[in-house]
Amino acid sequence: MAISAVLIVKNEAHHLRACLETLSFADEIVVLDAGSQDETLAIAREFTDNVQVAADWQGFGVQRQRAEALARHEWILMVDADERVTEELARSIQQAVTAPPAVYALPRLSWCFGRFIHHCGWYPDRVLRLYPKGLASYNAALVHEKLVVPDTLEVRPLAGDLLHYTYRDVRHYLEKSAHYADAWAEQRAARGKTASLGQGVAHALGCFLKMYLLKAGFRDGRQGFLLSLLSAHSTFNKYAALWVRGQPGPELR
């Protein structure tokens, strides 16, 4: 069975070449760009002719659905530009697609602030990324989109890591965190949900304790402490963003 490696990207020139070089085993590479202003498109076209642009951003879920539709082959491997497929994982993928249809969970190992993170609840971060086209598909969530798997498909693990080079520095983390917080709050507000700052504090504290103590983040050294603290901050930001949306606007005179 043939594999379509599919990516959604925007301004990923820093990562894209290294990612695409690890996808040479795929029968096709599909790149859907969201309106890059850097060299992303030029780099993508060095590796594939199937490069499209959809700049009317409607959220991560819709963009992945659009990218899925561009794939020509029976199996879809969804990859992000800041990820790398290891040789062991590539072999596992090639073997998996010779079996009956199923959805496969890839163990993802993240590099963050100078080291690979093996604790904090981050590893193995099994992500559903290999699936038969037309039998599974992404939902339309603005952020934190998920692959919808029908009951008729079994979920199976794969061997080999998907390396994830997630944040360049603290500023990059905070920028991505702010974006996700806004999208999360927008999505929740659209469903009529509200939040309090107290909820934000409680969830943030719970997040830190879970990551640093229960999930042994302390075993990842200073990076584990920083990541746990920043994750707690991000958790608070989500609830704060939702709370702010419920506050009255300015009185215009």
Image (tube, rainbow, N blue to C red):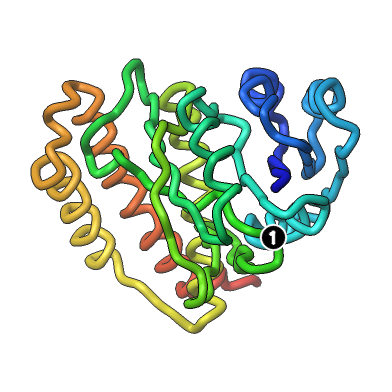
**Residue corresponding to mark 1:** 133
Residue name at image x 24 percent, y 53 percent: 204
Q: Is residue 124 visible?
A: yes
Q: Please determine whether, in this image, residue 148 is positioned above or below residue 29.
A: below
Q: Quadrant of the C terminus?
A: bottom right
In this view, the residue in front, 238 or 94, is 94
- The percent position of residue 184, horizontal first and vertical second, equals 49, 62
Residue name at image x 41 percent, y 32 percent: 160
In this view, the residue in front, 44 or 113, is 44
Q: Residues within 10 Å of mark 1 (few under 14, many from 20)?
A: some
Q: Secondary structure at mark 1?
A: loop
- The percent position of residue 20, horizontal first and vertical second, equals 68, 25
- The percent position of residue 159, horizontal first and vertical second, equals 39, 37
- The percent position of residue 156, horizontal first and vertical second, equals 41, 55
Toward the bottom, the furthest residue is 192
Toward the right, the furthest residue is 49
Residue name at image x 81 percent, y 24 percent: 47
Q: Is residue 183 visible?
A: no
Q: Please determine whether, in this image, residue 159 is positioned above or below residue 77.
A: above
Residue name at image x 54 percent, y 62 percent: 147
In this view, the residue in front, 180 or 136, is 136
Tell me the amino acid under the disc marked 1.
Lys
